[in-house]
Amino acid sequence: MGKAVRDDLHGLEISQKELQQLTNLPVKYQLVLITNPLKEFSKQLIYKMKGSEGATVVFISFSIFVFSYLIFDIIIKLFANWLTMPSWILLLIVCFAGSATIQIIFYLLWRNIRKILKENMTNSLEILLEDVDRYNAVIKAIDINDQIEAAGNPEVSIQKREKVIAALQLTRADLVRALKTERILRENQNFIISNTELFANNLATLTTMQVTEKATEHGKLLNEALQIALDVQYEMKRLQSPG
């Protein structure tokens, strides 16, 4: 979400870390590409170079590079003086080979994680993860709308914002409960659910809010929140059904 996210949106998004804790599975795990942190580092470096301390940044960066090269050159001369290839070429080869090795390790780790996830993925969990994506998308849309409003467009302000946030809070609670329930059933196939509080939901409240809000922008958001909640409720009922 945006840097200037409003206080009422804080804590609403269901993060990847929270999803992993709720499901006890490496969901939403992405393959790490070593080029990504390098790109980010380059962007930060260029940004700082354009600033008031640009000369200092350039000097420090150049000094680090030269120092690293000198250390590498000394190591080569001490332990591999039989190599005739220029040390700078060797440094490039070592950097390339090291990067390739690290990337292969990341790939093997990612493939293993994907295998674990595939073996434990249930149809219910897949549906719930899709609902989480939709729920987070609603929050992202609100955040972007807030940024547009803050940029000087008051006409896009969401009316009755408190009801929208309340609806999302209720939906979040249902999603969390459903994910907890799915995990219990997945990890305990023959477990008979006796904790009725896990299945408590707030659909009646959501429905009451939604009835008179259909034509407005915040009504659309409430409809989206309600639809997600209905999907969650359906999944929870299906989870409780034996077989």
Image: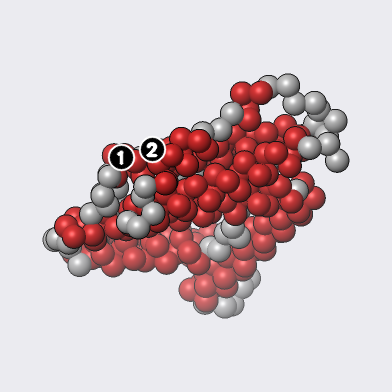
Verify CB contact (< 8 Å) between mark 1 and mark 2: yes
Q: Is residue 16 visible?
A: no
Reading the image, the residue beneath label 1 is: 162
Identify which residue is drawn at 59% across, 77% down.
84
Query: Residue 202 vs residue 192: left or right?
Result: left
Q: Secondary structure at mark 1?
A: helix
Residue closest to the eye, 45 or 169? 169
Residue closest to the eye, 29 or 216? 216
Q: Quadrant of the C terminus?
A: top right
Identify which residue is drawn at 14% across, 60% down.
152
Reading the image, the residue beneath label 2 is: 166
Query: Residue 238 vs residue 33: left or right?
Result: right
Q: As shown in the figure, which amino acid type bears the numbered disc 1? A: Glu
Q: Position of residue 128 (x, y in %)?
A: 63, 48
Q: Position of residue 12 (x, y in %)?
A: 42, 41
Mark 1 → mark 2, Cα distance in angstroms: 6 Å
Coloring applied to the structure: secondary structure
Identify which residue is drawn at 45% across, 52% down.
223
Q: Indicate whether 173 appears above or below 56.
A: above
Q: As shown in the figure, which amino acid type bears the numbered disc 2? A: Ala
